[in-house]
Structure formats: structure tokens, C-alpha cells
Amino acid sequence: MKYWVCKRGPHHAFEALECLGGNGYVETFPLARRYREQPVLSIWEGSGNVVCLDVIRSLRVPQALDAFLAELHEAAGDDTRFDMFVRDLEAELRGGDDLEPLARRLTERMALALQASLLLRFAPTVVADAFCAARLGDQTSFEYGTLPRGVDTAAIIQRHIGHC
């Protein structure tokens, strides 16, 4: 998760800044500082390559891989896109000893699978469905607001407003 947060953080800060426009960029507004500092997280927390290689090294401990997959399997059967994603990921993870060239891709896919598993188990169904459609489905994108057709955004908004 450390890799994923450090890689997604700068983009998240940029999106927040974009929402506020020029007001978010002026130095008197705290978001300008946050925007500048986000890339530093990947240096303080370890470079992306090092973190991903650590992930691959940890997977060589059979209990670590089994524990990770068991966590994912807690949500098995809740979403077909998730099930297919996990099946493909597990095949990649168990596919051989030469995982280093795939370290970033596998770490990213592991983070997505864990996010989806947690959402499927603990978030409202409409939110988990939107995540799986946008991040695991056929029309994936990591840009915010790029939900594929068919996602019930009205239900998501209504669900959110109902909790405010």
C-alpha cells in the first residue's frame, strides 16, 4: 500500500488543486504546499522500485503470499470482475521465480485487488461495484471521474448525501 499511496498521492493532490483552481495554488492556501510535497513522499518512504522489490522479496515467503491471497479470497464470489482479476493475479504471482521485471505491475495489481476486496466486504454495494467497474473491468482508467457506462452514479451520490 505504501507504493500505491506514494504513486497516487501527487495525482490526488493535483485533482484537488484543479477543483479549487487558482485559489488552491496560491501560497497562502495549504493545498499549494501539499501539492509540492506529495512527490517527496516516495523519497521519504522509499523509492518505488525499492518498495516493489521488497514486495517481490516478501512473496518468496510462502506464508506471506498465502496470507495475502487468503485476504483477497474473503471477497470471492462477490463480483465476477474481481474474481477474474484475482485469478489472473494469482497465476502471475505463482508463475515463477523471475518476478523482478514485473515488480511494479504486480505491486500495482496487488494494491487494486486489496482495495477491491476491502470495498466488496465493507463498503456499500454501489461503491464497490463502481470501483470494480472502473478499476478492474474492461474500461479501466486511473483518472478520477472516468466511470464506465452503466455505473449508477445517482445511487452513489444519494448514498453519500444520506450519510452527511
Image: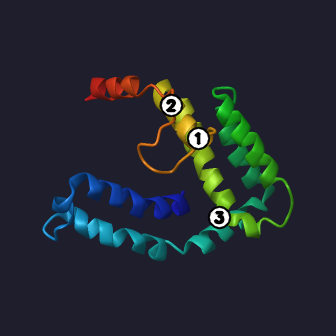
Q: Nearer the viewer, residue 2 or 134?
A: 134
Secondary structure beneath disc 3?
helix
- Three-letter amino acid code at disc 1? Gln
* Colour scheme in use: rainbow
Q: Is residue 91 visible?
A: yes
| Dots 2, 1 in contact, CB < 8 A | yes
Q: Residue at x 62, y 73 (%)?
A: 49
The relative height of residue 85 versus residue 30 in the rendered view (above or below) is above
Q: Nearer the viewer, residue 80 or 66?
A: 80
Secondary structure beneath disc 2?
loop
The relative height of residue 88 versus residue 40 in the rendered view (above or below) is above
Q: Residue at x 65, y 64 (%)?
A: 104
Residue 65 pos. (x, y %): 75, 52
Q: Quadrant of residue 71?
A: top right
Q: Which mark is residue 139?
A: 1
Q: Which mark is residue 149?
A: 2
The relative height of residue 67 versus residue 29 in the rendered view (above or below) is above
Residue topped by disc 3? 104
Q: Is residue 118 visible?
A: no
- Three-letter amino acid code at disc 3? Arg
